[in-house]
Amino acid sequence: MARDAYTSREVEVPEGVKVEVEGLVVKVKGPKGELARDFSHARGVVISAKEGKVIVESYFPTAREKATVGSVAAHIKNMILGVTRGFRYKLKVIYVHYPISVKVEKGKVLITNQIGEKDVREVNIPKDVKVTVSGQDVIVEGIDVEKVAQTAARIEEVTRIRGKDRRKFSDGIYIYAREVM
């Protein structure tokens, strides 16, 4: 079976967003901030910026390189979306047995009274991510989708109950919404 000679993806750059490409390093500046990402791991991929577009391409690509072209283009779209609108994850505090207390202090999310434990569970907050607690909701916001998602997942993971029947012990903090602001 013959390989395709060429594959590419184009990413539109909206007004007010500046994209700089230096080799495989992409920097995106927008109204909400600036993001940079190194794609040097992407073998066989060429990235270039031309007149309101970012072009990700590969010549004589293998199946893996074709997939990498699509992945790199998707990452660049997320970077552009992040600096123009931002990302928000919403988590809900759910408890049946003991009231879970959640607060944000000094760059950490502190979770206490998880199923009656005295230990304080901590989650570090990356510098570009904002976490707020309002009532039973924990809101994680930022411009880098990966940092926002990882912070929300870490909060959910740290409250996971192990060794008990999950049908009875549903206490924890769970992601219930992912959105672009």
Image (cartoon, rainbow, N blue to C red):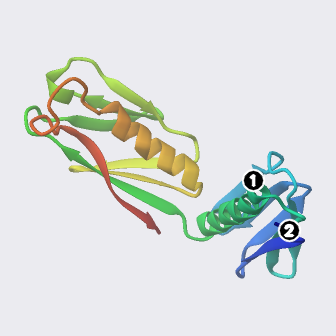
Residue type at mark 2 is Ala
Nearer to me, 72 or 90: 72
- Left/right of residue 138 with respect to residue 52 in the rendered view: left
- Left/right of residue 72 with respect to residue 44 in the rendered view: left
Q: Quadrant of the N terminus?
A: bottom right
Residue at disc 2, secondary structure: loop
Q: Residue at x 48, y 50 (%)?
A: 149
The single residue placed furthest to the front in the displayed view is 1
* Residue 124 appearing in the image: yes
Q: Quadrant of residue 96?
A: top left
Nearer to me, 75 or 164: 164
- Left/right of residue 83 with respect to residue 23 in the rendered view: left
Q: Which residue is mark 1?
A: 36
Task: Give how far across and how far down residue 4 sits, in percent.
Answer: 85, 71
Q: Residue at x 29, y 33 (%)?
A: 160
Numbered circle sitting on residue 2: 2
Task: Give how far across and how far down residue 23 sits, in percent.
Answer: 92, 55
Q: Residue at x 27, y 42 (%)?
A: 173
Indicate which label's residue lies in the foreground, 2 or 1. Answer: 2
